[in-house]
Image: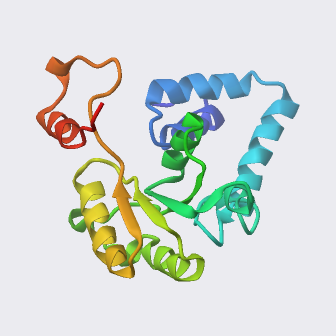
């Protein structure tokens, strides 16, 4: 139902179509935008247009960037012999926030999911193999999500890469810090036990 007139209703509908934005959040954002000074609203819309028109895949790791090579791949201080394979640019950003990893990344932009019609050729595996051939890394860390699709992708990659005499490792999965064991699911507990290390 149209309570506010066409322009506001259209803005709410466009915002509500974004992932993770429900109708109430869209309405709140729409009113915030309407009440912004004109120059700030124009700067926001220009940022969206600039990102849409200028963001592309890094020619090395397939991360999103606005230059040919992303800042991480271009950084000579990073360990270019260690490549962490992630599903999504957001996963890469999560690892960067830890400040514990100094290697480089490869972004797959998805995971193998036959149920959803996503096969190996639908994600950036071919680019990874080409990069391995060119860069000759010492270790590939597979950091796909610990779900069915992520595990299938990890197994597939491992089978492709191990014959190339490159060390392939998988991130450990386990109990989140601060979590109570009684609330942790069985798969996570099993993985935590499996990935145990000597103290």
Taking the image as drawn, is residue 2 in sight?
A: yes
- By what rule are the colours in the image chosen? rainbow
- The percent position of residue 192, horizontal first and vertical second, equals 22, 36
Q: Is residue 12 above or below residue 66?
A: above
Q: Nearer the viewer, residue 16 or 132?
A: 132
Which residue is situated farthest in the front direction here?
A: 199
Q: Residue 197 falls in which quadrant of the image? A: top left
How many numbered marks appear? 0
Q: Residue at x 61, y 37 (%)?
A: 11
- Decide if residue 79 is on the left or right side of residue 126: right
Which residue is situated farthest in the left direction here?
A: 186
- The percent position of residue 95, horizontal first and vertical second, equals 52, 42
Q: Residue at x 27, y 29 (%)?
A: 175
Could you tell me which quadrant the C terminus lies in?
A: top left
Could you tell me which quadrant the N terminus lies in?
A: top left
Q: Residue at x 78, y 34 (%)?
A: 41
Q: Residue at x 43, y 73 (%)?
A: 125
- The percent position of residue 188, horizontal first and vertical second, equals 20, 36
Q: Is residue 84 above or below residue 191?
A: below
Q: Is residue 141 above or below residue 30?
A: below
Which residue is situated farthest in the right direction here?
A: 39
- Decide if residue 155 is on the left or right side of residue 88: left
Taking the image as drawn, is residue 108 in sight?
A: no
Q: Nearer the viewer, residue 23 or 83?
A: 83
- Decide if residue 105 is on the left or right side of residue 129: right
């Amino acid at each position: 139902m149209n309570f506010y007139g066409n322009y506001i209703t259209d803005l709410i509908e466009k915002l509500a179509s974004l992932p993770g934005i429900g109708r109430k959040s869209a309405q709140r954002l729409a009113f915030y935008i309407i009440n912004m000074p004109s120059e700030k609203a124009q700067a926001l819309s220009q940022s969206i247009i600039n990102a849409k028109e200028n963001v592309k895949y890094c020619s090395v790791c397939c991360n999103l960037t606005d230059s040919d090579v992303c800042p991480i791949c271009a950084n000579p201080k990073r360990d270019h012999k260690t490549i962490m394979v992630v599903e999504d640019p957001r996963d890469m950003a999560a690892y960067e926030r830890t400040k514990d990893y100094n290697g480089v990344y490869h972004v797959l932009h998805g995971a193998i999911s036959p149920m959803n019609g996503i096969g190996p050729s639908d994600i950036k595996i071919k680019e990874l193999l080409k990069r391995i051939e060119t860069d000759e890394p010492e270790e590939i860390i597979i950091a796909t999500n610990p779900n069915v699709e992520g595990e299938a992708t990890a197994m597939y990659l491992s089978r492709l890469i191990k014959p190339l005499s490159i060390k392939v490792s998988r991130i450990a999965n386990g109990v989140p810090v601060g979590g109570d064991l009684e609330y942790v699911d069985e798969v996570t507990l099993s993985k935590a036990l499996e990935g145990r290390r000597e103290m």
